Amino acid sequence: MPTKKQTPNNYILIIFDSCRYDAFIRAAPKTIRKLGKVEKRWSYASWTAPSHYNFLMGLMPHRSPKHVYASEYYKKEFLKFNERLGVDDFEFKSLVPKLYLPHFLRDKMGYHTHAKVSLPVLNPRTVINQGFDSFKLMEKHNDMRAMVRELKFYKNKPSFYILNVGETHYPYALPDEPPNEWPRISGVHGVFKHLDDQVVGGKLVKQKQEKFFDDKKLRQLKKRQIDAVRYLDNVVEELFDAVPENTYITITADHGELFGEEGYFGHGPIMHEKVFEVPFVEGKLR
Ligand SMILES: [Zn+2]
């Protein structure tokens, strides 16, 4: 029997910037887990910009599958958008030729498309701004609650949001923590306008005058990221209360973070498995 064509789901893709998998698991977020089983997945890139481009092509962090061709894996992964959007005819070629999700959702599916980002490296003047009705760099780099308050949904027109959330990014500060209490890296005091320029990461090199993080400091930093996830779990609860019924939500990270393993801190120019390990969970609440 033919069924009445329903409005597609609202779709919200939430990126906890720099949140590594084990920090997420240690935080044991109760609300977020209502979406489904938390998987360990791997980011395609070790830092923010390429990783977000990948998301916007429709490719979520991967499962590192063995004995399959990449093209087969992509095809299968793209079919998941049928569940996310609540449609039945989405496939990889739906994105041709631009291969860009915001264009597809806005121009072919009639979505409102919005990006709210925390990290200046994704600012609205960058080329990833394509296909969005609005693209906003938030006032503070660490206030997901401010994003949740700005979300709007409509009855007959679905919305797509990508939210790049900064609380989990260095310095892992919650919005009410005064900047003068944030942990500091030598040489980059107070430079948060250009967060990713300055603090992408790298190998900790001991220099004569500059003292880099010691083990105790690195443990504190990791704990701060775990605490940030716990805090975000409460903000996600507010989000769950705010979204309409037909809303599908994905929560993941753009890359992990190093907290001193093998001499590395941060993310970016790092070849270490912890910089690729990310949490991945998605589903529809009701
Ligand atoms: Zn990032």
Image (cartoon, helix red, strand yellow):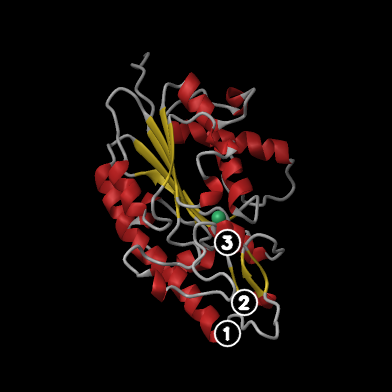
Please state which of residues 218 and 180 is positioned toward the viewer in this rendering. Answer: 180
Cβ atoms under marks 3 and 1 closer than 8 Å: no
Residue identifier under label 1: 215
- Report helix, strand or loop for mark 1: helix
Q: Residue at the top extreme?
A: 2
- Badge nearest the viewer, 3 or 1: 1
The quarter of the picture where the N terminus appears is: top left
Residue type at numbered disc 1 = Asp
- Give whichever of 98, 132 is nearer the camera: 132
Measure the C-alpha gap from mark 3 to mark 2.
Answer: 13 Å
Q: Residues within 10 Å of mark 1 (few under 14, many from 20)?
A: few
Q: Secondary structure under badge 3? A: loop
Is the CB of the residue bearing disc 3 within 8 angstroms of ligand 1? no
Per the image, label 2 sits on a secondary structure element best described as loop
In this rendering, does residue 25 appear at all? Answer: yes
Q: Look at 45% across and 57% down and name the residue there.
A: 166
Q: Do the residues under discs 1 and 2 have CB atoms within 8 angstroms?
A: yes
> Mark 3–mark 2 contact, CB under 8 Å?
no
Asked if the beta carbon under badge 2 is closer than 8 A to the nearest atom of ligand 1, the reply is no
First in residue order: circle 3 vs circle 1 = 1
Report the Cα–Cα distance between label 1 and label 2: 7 Å
Amino acid tagged 2: Gly
Is disc 3 surrounded by few (<14), some (14 to 19) or many (20+) residues within 10 Å? Answer: many
Q: Image quadrant of residue 9?
A: top left
Q: For mark 2, what is the residue? A: 260
